[in-house]
Amino acid sequence: MTSTTVHLAVYDTFADWEPGFATAHLTQHGHTVRTVGPTTAPVTTMGGLRVQPDLALDELDPRGSSLLLLTGASLWDNGDDLAPFARAARTFLDAGVPVAAICGATAGLAREGLLDDRRHTSAVSFYLAATGYTGGAHYIEADAVTDTGGVSRGALVTAGPTEPVAFAREILGLLGVYEPKKLDAWYRLFHDSDPSAYEVLQG
């Protein structure tokens, strides 16, 4: 993986607090975060912030990316407006480029059939079951899950809506931002408020 560009999907009603831990620490460690919207027209987050996308979805190419990051949004469960982002996730995974999805984005991936044969998690199992997907046997009760994808498919990170720190931990580990000991310390600091972890991170 040579690209250091992470693409963050942005769309109306996206949950702006969910990607923050990941994107903040990625940008502090040599990665560039670019936003991709349905078009380049501004979108409004669930928190009322206006975001100007850097590029439109039809311009997105996995060959120039190290990760596609999909957050939750009300729109995932209200029609098919965001289905093109789930199809983009399929393109990324087929190209061997990782995808990370949290909250409602996991339901979008389920509807696209991307969770049918991969280890994954979400808010609760019955939330995904309501999509009609066939991957229930691969559901794991965990804060966040990484399915490495095997030889020919990209890795897939999933998490529930209350776990932005665990979600970030999986992403930071997948992209090699921290080695395991520091990654554990990072998680203990930001998830558990463990002051002893700070010294490990600074070491």
Image: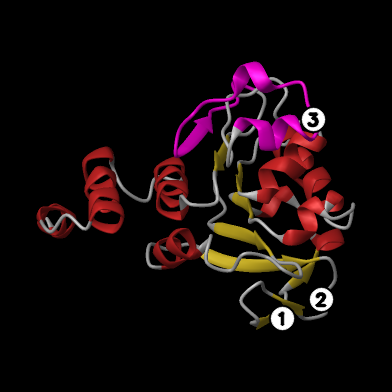
> Label 3 near label 2: C-beta < 8 Å?
no
State the image coordinates of residue 188 (x, y, percent, origin top left): 24, 49
| Location of mark 3 (residue) | 113
Identify the magenta region: 125-151
Please tell me whether mark 2 or mark 3 is closer to you in this view.
3
| Location of mark 1 (residue) | 52
| The N terminus, quarter of image | top right
| Label 2, label 1: how far apart the Cα atoms are | 7 Å
| Location of mark 2 (residue) | 40
Residue found at x 68% / y 65%: 14
Give the residue at the far right of this rendering.
Answer: 80
Left or right of residue 132: residue 194: left
Quarter location, residue 193 = bottom left
Quarter location, residue 111 = top right
Q: Amino acid at mark 1?
A: Gln
State the image coordinates of residue 42 (x, y, percent, origin top left): 77, 81
